[in-house]
Amino acid sequence: MAHSHDSTEPLLGNGRPNTARLLISCADRRGIVAAVSRFLFEHGANILDADQHSTDPSGGTFFMRMEFHLEGLDLGRRELEHAFATTVAEQFAMEWRIAYASRPKRVALLVSREEHCLLDLLWRWRSGDLDAEIGLVVSNHRDAERDVESFGVPFVHVPVRRESKAQAEGEILGHLNGPHGPFELIVLARYMQILSGDFLAAASAPLINIHHSFLPAFAGADPYRRASERGVKIIGATAHYVTEELDAGPIIEQDVAHVSHRDSVADLVRIGRDIERTVLARAVARHLADRVLVHENKTVVF
Amino acid sequence: MAHSHDSTEPLLGNGRPNTARLLISCADRRGIVAAVSRFLFEHGANILDADQHSTDPSGGTFFMRMEFHLEGLDLGRRELEHAFATTVAEQFAMEWRIAYASRPKRVALLVSREEHCLLDLLWRWRSGDLDAEIGLVVSNHRDAERDVESFGVPFVHVPVRRESKAQAEGEILGHLNGPHGPFELIVLARYMQILSGDFLAAASAPLINIHHSFLPAFAGADPYRRASERGVKIIGATAHYVTEELDAGPIIEQDVAHVSHRDSVADLVRIGRDIERTVLARAVARHLADRVLVHENKTVVF
Amino acid sequence: MAHSHDSTEPLLGNGRPNTARLLISCADRRGIVAAVSRFLFEHGANILDADQHSTDPSGGTFFMRMEFHLEGLDLGRRELEHAFATTVAEQFAMEWRIAYASRPKRVALLVSREEHCLLDLLWRWRSGDLDAEIGLVVSNHRDAERDVESFGVPFVHVPVRRESKAQAEGEILGHLNGPHGPFELIVLARYMQILSGDFLAAASAPLINIHHSFLPAFAGADPYRRASERGVKIIGATAHYVTEELDAGPIIEQDVAHVSHRDSVADLVRIGRDIERTVLARAVARHLADRVLVHENKTVVF
Amino acid sequence: MAHSHDSTEPLLGNGRPNTARLLISCADRRGIVAAVSRFLFEHGANILDADQHSTDPSGGTFFMRMEFHLEGLDLGRRELEHAFATTVAEQFAMEWRIAYASRPKRVALLVSREEHCLLDLLWRWRSGDLDAEIGLVVSNHRDAERDVESFGVPFVHVPVRRESKAQAEGEILGHLNGPHGPFELIVLARYMQILSGDFLAAASAPLINIHHSFLPAFAGADPYRRASERGVKIIGATAHYVTEELDAGPIIEQDVAHVSHRDSVADLVRIGRDIERTVLARAVARHLADRVLVHENKTVVF
């Protein structure tokens, strides 16, 4: 099972690491690191990895991620969280959460016709590079059905027509919350329908989208054609959290490739596919490892 | 002396290569390459380098650049051009020109306060990497004066105030066409004043600008601040020919660097400087080597 | 069907472009381009794309690739080749060949346990990005069998043991020249057995290998472990033609990724996979488009 | 004055940040972060930035860098260091040091004929991007003399002949420890003489070298020629600490550029210059910010 940095750590009976990730954001002031690390040390946790960031040491926002072993801890999970809330979090008015690596996150994928991002995620998942449990693929087309099922993943087809879009969204929600669900992450792996604010509110899980341009350039439809018309020398792709405003959500990851006058729109599409699938995979992996914090429409990616 | 590909070629008495560059664009049809290469062969030219591009073999536009030795040619320059015009160019309704490498292009630089691009060009020029004759630097500030003069290049200071902008532009034109001029290329090496259409028309030389963002993202003012606010993970720079529409001219070269939440606006500015100077230097070098053709607000860069 | 640059060109009945690619290398001298382009023009060919390169205009080697339409040609293939041989090639003592795009090249893949490169090629092939006919996969393990067959490609298992290596190579040759063969290209998609000089001689097709390091650094076994021990900040992958000397054949394509002290050997392996599959796919695509010429253990990649 | 991340922090009277950087390495075990952060908190320090890394949580080596404000501290520097040594460092058997940002590090540069790296460092220094006090340039040639002096930096010429190399090294040491010295960092900005182990021992400051290849490929002399002969598609540069074994010291930073068959050795040299100066500048900046720890011939670069 995929776990990146620490091949030597003790594993649980299910072969997974027995670690937790504490994520914090709060107003920056003295003593935060000391308070958190003392708390963990006093309860027997061994810190494996720590990252912190402050937008401004005086008056800014402080972000921290600490990954630690649960083995040897003197408290159960519930007690640990309760103790942290009352002895540390309250004092610093923290927003915080603890995620446990003992169980992979459940993920649903949405896709339309282009399946390069979808298949790339499924391969990485099968080869152990993506620490998730992919439990469902939903598509408004049937193109990917056979491929998805060959990975042993359930596939449902929800056609979307302009006049019955709300109904289709309801049907998708039904599947997400149905027998295969619920899900902790929804990935739009080149899903080409715009989702309504109602859907996003009801989905109750973050959504990651891959946009096939270097945002904010060429937001909206048909970016490769527009890039070609503008004569740019670089194209890119952007993975971001989905918000109600189209292509304007917090950016998680971006990458680019050089192109030239020799490349037609079809070439840009082909070159773009490699960037898209890499960028989306990186963003999803970061999210699954609880490495992304959102703050004012921007991300802190540890 | 800077000349990139062919260290073995015979040189002129002034140490410069005795080569010419023929640039062509015309409607694509059969026989263009054959006609041009036969013409050159029959007059004794040896082709050193050839590039061609067609936007579409049926009904598109054809572009070609051929670099050839003048040594052994049976015609003088004027006769060669006349012969080409009448025996080849007319038949294919070509737009064409021949540039000679025996003389470097005369270049003027405009700069405001930030001098990293200016100094980079001057240093490349002095070390022989930029095949030009830099004959004048014009600035609306005095910051760069001493540095420019240490390179032995004349410096003139033309302050620009909002209320007398037209007058300042006239003064600059006077310098460009004065004793140091005329110039075949004007480079805006972080010149932060918007130039009027009248100026561009009167300048009678192409202008290359470096914009400190990855166009078309963040066109206009203050791109690094806006990039930081949008939370992008990549910043870039764009070198383009100047047209009357701000930041919308044909793009010659672009490049980018990865950034993260750790980078403040000041960091983006600092990181951006390295990209800006590299991108501008590459674009200027391509132009000086007669490698850039413009077509419908896009470039073909051979 | 995949074909990169010219979506507008006339297609054959089988949906493939009716074009040919003429590849030339010879001692450089005057008149080569003129002679070749006149020959093609006089026989009615329309040049779609042309590239040339000279290692040195006086006394060097000249390389050229011309892609042209066969439609409208006044000669059949055999007559064209004969005419070219006698009227042009002989005069300049050219090495040359003409490849026809009307038929995709037949390709065999060899793989061991790691299937990321294999699956990537198969998926690009299925989505039309790889202009080939993949006719056979040979492996010394059974791991990839089911996946390969799901693409409708025959799979044969040829176990290799140290003591019977020559016999195994004979068996592989038998498959390559058997009912599924013959093949015009053999791709080692992470095939971890060293092939003997006898095998290479008998294979009668070029072999492309992907080496999981930035050659010539870390040639030989276990490059990621050695890269980690040396503390490099960049890892890479190299696609090259296979020659008898291990990891020393002509390099077709290379790329890299930045790494840091945080990346364990396992991380390098994982990051490396993405570079390997991209680099191999690019090299194979270039070869299939007849864009690679070999000269003194180096490549010219047009 | 250059200081990267925190434009808002209180400055000293000399305009410099009043911060310290604590660098630690020790055997990894529980409680290190808690002990260090409690110590700093209890003495009134505000942590601005913290990075940590463990080669292995069980039995590996732990590295940490903490940057904190001195303002509000209840101890002077000497007392702080003493208190840390006795209450924290001893307990964990730490190797540690505290560096103070209140004073820039004194740096000497060594150069031979190629001055692109030297001038680049001097420009960055003058424009405030390099937080150092460049106090001396030593060269075995006179080429750079006038340029160096135009930056107001003393220049000394120490010619090196094969038969009197030891004497020349002694002379250089004399300058490094003379009226302009001593220095805390020596940068070999394309200094093309191999320095003896005796010199390195006597220099009593770390040395950073820029090697003009992607190490470990093409270690030793003339790397661009050898890269061209091998036909690589990427060239690079490597900044590393100097050790007695040539080109084998701990790597701090590397970067690369793509090249092709079109690039002659002279082109590689020219392209390489841009990579060299960028890579060296990054490595020096990291060192000056006390962000590099060395461990078993590898670096941890925070």
Image (spheres, coloured by chain):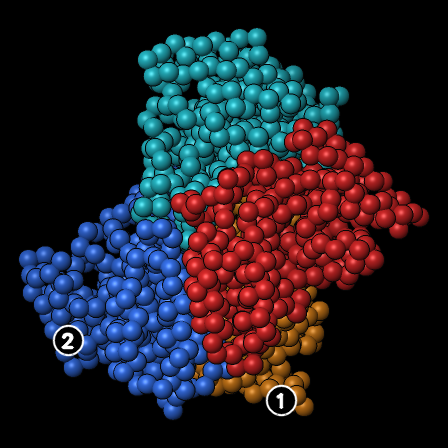
Chain colours: A orange, B red, C blue, D cyan
Residue at the right extreme of this rendering: B163
For the image shown, how many numbered marks are present on the structure?
A: 2
Tell me the quarter of the picture where residue C275 sits. Answer: bottom left
**Left or right: C85 with respect to B38?**
left
For this rendering, which residue is in front, D183 or C91?
C91
**SS for callout 1:** loop
Amino acid on which disc 2 is placed: Asn
Residue depicted at 25% across the width and 78% down the height:
C82
**Which of the chains bears the disc numbered 1?**
A
Residue A80 screen position, x and y as percent: 54, 49
Residue depicted at 52% across the width and 36% down the height:
D277
Q: Which mark is residue B186?
A: none
Residue C7 screen position, x and y as percent: 49, 80
- Looking at the image, is B52 positioned above or below residue B128? below
Discs 1 and 2 carry the same chain letter: no
Q: Which residue is mark 1?
A: A161
**SS for callout 2:** loop
Amino acid on which disc 1 is placed: Arg
Residue A79 screen position, x and y as percent: 55, 51
Q: Which residue is mark 2?
A: C177
Tell me the quarter of the picture where residue B41 sits. Answer: bottom left
